[in-house]
Image (tube, helix red, strand yellow):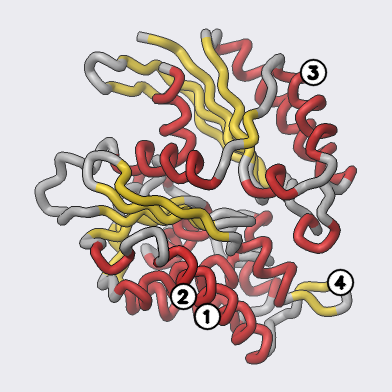
């Protein structure tokens, strides 16, 4: 049994998993799992640089995570950084800050590597589920990018495209520096056009049409699931492996794009850091389901973090 710590730093959030892993049996015992919305990718799509305030929010979260990792005595740590830090000109500032706080250099991984970690984390428990048809299509809808992975027990094809809830919101749903509340029909159409172009790009590499089970990961998907389930508060256990029908996703996506900021914020399961970006995130999920004709999405709370943990166990 090896005690490991995995950190996933994306465009919108930074997350930590500390777990005991036994590679011989495939058992993982979760000790601590937490998420902090830091919006590292703030304005990266427009400026090409990580904003000073975004870096400081991220470093503050890293300092909190360092204390947890030390307290729990993790033997190994891996820090993976994804879309925002791939795109930024000044990512060396980010790398140096993480190294000073956590003692490891963040690995700015490729989209394909990100996809492989996501697939492993999401499907390790599902591989033996007789009620789910293969191949799986795992989609990880992040803040800056979305990963598409098709496979059975192992990855067969993967592609990362630059469509995520933060990127789409900042690119199309902001007017005069303020998120439209709610967005106009023209703004929503622009988001949808970008998503469809990204799906065309993904389909060149990943056989989307061959998928028999759609598995959805990350905050946009789990938030949609929590709303669909009518939960009074966010409940990871209830959300994990829930199956949300297409009709529910379509209804919730439309509603998130019609509500005001205050109305979205009042939803009991809504994390404050997702209030402004959930509309775009839900629309990405809806477009994927429509493209492949999925009747439902299987929601997983286990994702790239779990894949990272297994990679170092």
Tell me which label, 3 or 1, sits earlier in the chain.
3
Report if the CB atoms under discs 2 and 1 are less than 8 Å apart: yes
Tell me which label, 2 or 4, sits earlier in the chain.
4
- Nearer the viewer's eye, disc 4 or disc 1? 4
What residue appears at the point 46 percent right and 72 percent down from the top-left corner? 200
Instruction: Measuring from the top left, give residue 274's x and y in whole percent.
Output: 63, 59
Give me the C-alpha separation between circle 3 and circle 4. 33 Å
Tell me which label, 4 or 1, sits earlier in the chain.
4
Residue at the bottom extreme? 185
* Residue neighbourhood size for the residue with mark 4, other residues' Cα within 10 Å, grouped as few (<14), some (14–19), many (≥20): few
- Nearer the viewer's eye, disc 3 or disc 4? 3
Viewer can see residue 299: no
Viewer can see residue 160: yes
* Residue neighbourhood size for the residue with mark 1, other residues' Cα within 10 Å, grouped as few (<14), some (14–19), many (≥20): some
Give me the C-alpha separation between circle 2 and circle 3. 42 Å
Tell me which label, 3 or 4, sits earlier in the chain.
3
Check disc 1 and report the residue beneath it: 255
Where 132 falls versus 285 (above or below)? Answer: above
Element type where label 1 sits in the image: helix
Check disc 4 and report the residue beneath it: 177
Give me the C-alpha separation between circle 3 and circle 1. 44 Å
């Amino acid at each position: 049994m090896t005690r490991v710590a995995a950190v996933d730093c994306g465009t919108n959030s930074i997350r930590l998993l500390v777990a005991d892993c036994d590679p011989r049996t495939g058992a993982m015992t979760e000790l601590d799992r937490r998420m902090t919305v830091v919006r590292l990718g703030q304005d990266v799509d427009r400026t090409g640089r990580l904003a000073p305030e975004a870096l400081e929010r991220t470093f503050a979260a890293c300092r909190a995570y360092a204390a947890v990792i030390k307290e729990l005595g993790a033997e190994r740590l891996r820090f993976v950084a994804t879309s925002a830090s791939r795109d930024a000109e000044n990512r060396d500032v980010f790398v140096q800050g993480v190294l000073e706080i956590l003692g490891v250099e963040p690995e700015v991984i490729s989209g394909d590597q990100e996809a492989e970690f996501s697939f492993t984390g999401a499907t390790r428990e599902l591989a033996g589920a007789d009620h789910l048809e293969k191949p799986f299509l795992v989609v990880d809808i992040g803040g800056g990018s979305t990963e598409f992975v098709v496979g059975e027990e192992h990855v067969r094809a993967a592609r990362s495209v630059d469509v995520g809830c933060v990127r789409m919101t900042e690119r199309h749903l902001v007017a005069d520096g303020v998120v439209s509340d709610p967005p106009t029909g023209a703004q929503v159409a622009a988001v949808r056009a970008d998503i469809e172009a990204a799906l065309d790009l993904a389909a060149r590499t990943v056989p989307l049409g061959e998928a028999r089970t759609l598995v959805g990961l990350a905050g946009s998907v789990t938030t949609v699931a929590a709303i669909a389930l009518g939960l009074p508060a966010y409940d990871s256990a209830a959300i994990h492996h829930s199956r949300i029908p297409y009709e529910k996703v379509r209804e919730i996506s439309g509603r998130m794009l019609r509500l005001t900021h205050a109305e979205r914020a009042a939803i009991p399961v809504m994390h404050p850091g997702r209030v402004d970006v959930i509309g775009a995130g839900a629309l990405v999920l809806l477009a994927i389901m429509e493209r492949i004709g999925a009747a439902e999405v299987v929601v997983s709370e286990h994702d790239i973090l779990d894949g990272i943990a297994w990679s170092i166990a």
